[in-house]
Amino acid sequence: MEKVVFLDRNSLKANLRRPSFDHEWGEFDQTLSSDVVDRLKGATIAITNKVPIRKDSIDQLPDLKFIAVAATGYDVIDIPACKDRGISVANIRNYAVNTVPEHTFSLILSLKRNLVAYRKDILAGRWQKHDQFCFFDYPIGDLSGSTIGIFGEGVLGQGTANIAKAFGMNVLFADHPPPKAEGVKFTDPEELLREADVISLHCPLTESSRNFIGLNEFKKMKKKAILINTARGGLVNEQDLVIALKEGLIAGAGFDVLTKEPPIEGNPLLDINLPNFILTPHVAWASDGAMQFLADQLIDNVELFISGDPQHLVT
């Protein structure tokens, strides 16, 4: 009989059916890294969203043969250690095709139209004391005719591009080493940084992409540009972003991710009190429909692995 353990069940707000094969099920609301080995003892299948499973834990779990990641990103898993042990790892595909692009544009529109600044002024009584029907203290920018530069041409990047085109925006995709999506016209990243009015990140976090947006890149951007990150914390040097915002190197930024989540030890982005910076708590993926789709595919991945016909493997 298989033993299935979900390490962070509270990270998924959806109905989760039990696998159809004979199994013992265990789940925990959340799990500290120090408790991973104890909680996965005897488990053949581990389910995790954001709880790391590293080599030191894998070496102590001789029964483990499959890890189902409840997310698209799988940087919480030590992939080389899994390959060495013959442990299969599967992730979730194509579940946030609407919710992430829509959240991306929520941030873009809020920043381009300075909604946070105007809302703050209304709460402070600015409109109530004004001598005319409106006031124009903050610039308002149209999207039509502007250019969006996108890093990452997967389903989320292309979903964002489709919305951008509907707004009448020009779309640039950043070039990168293979593999690449077919049918996409790519632009040199340096040119993209110079030309884009909006830059949106939809690429994975790898050693080569870690901190790939830093002070040098901010200096190449237009001063009116805004940066959006609904992908992964760690893609942008957070301290450099603080400098870029405070010194006016860019016009604004909207982030849904931080390098370490939750930010129990603090983070420089938490201390930014500027109307041109918006931070949301990693919820771009979390529409009700997207979470249920994820939950269903998660158990599909587990069942198909046991049936001998696995899908969405990354090892």
Image (tube, helix red, strand yellow):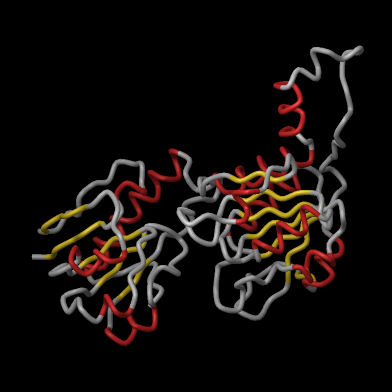
The residue most toward the right is 131
Estimate the x, y position of residue 48 in percent, counting from the top left.
32, 60
Instruction: Please give the name of the residue rendered at 71% of the width and 59% of the height, measured from the top-left corner.
Output: 241
Point out the image quarter for the N terminus: bottom left
| Closer to the camera in the image, 97 or 136 | 136
Left or right: 187 in relation to 3: right
Q: Give the quarter of the image for residue 231.
A: bottom right
Instruction: Please give the name of the residue rendered at 84% of the width and 43% of the height, measured from the top-left corner.
Output: 144
| Closer to the camera in the image, 265 or 284 | 265
Instruction: Please give the name of the residue rendered at 81% of the width and 66% of the height, measured from the top-left corner.
Output: 192
Instruction: Please give the name of the residue rendered at 81% of the width and 65% of the height, measured from the top-left corner.
Output: 193
Asked if residue 273 is positioned above or below residue 72 in the image, the reply reads above
Left or right: 99 in relation to 33: right
Total number of numbered discs in the rendering: 0
| Closer to the camera in the image, 22 or 245 | 245
Point out the image quarter for the C terminus: bottom left
Asked if residue 186 is positioned above or below residue 269 in the image, the reply reads below
Estimate the x, y position of residue 8 in percent, counting from the top left.
30, 54
Estimate the x, y position of residue 20 in percent, counting from the top left.
17, 54
The residue most toward the bottom is 84
Left or right: 217 in relation to 80: right
Q: Give the quarter of the image for residue 118.
A: top right
Asked if residue 156 is positioned above or below residue 191 in the image, the reply reads above
Estimate the x, y position of residue 41 in percent, counting from the top left.
15, 69
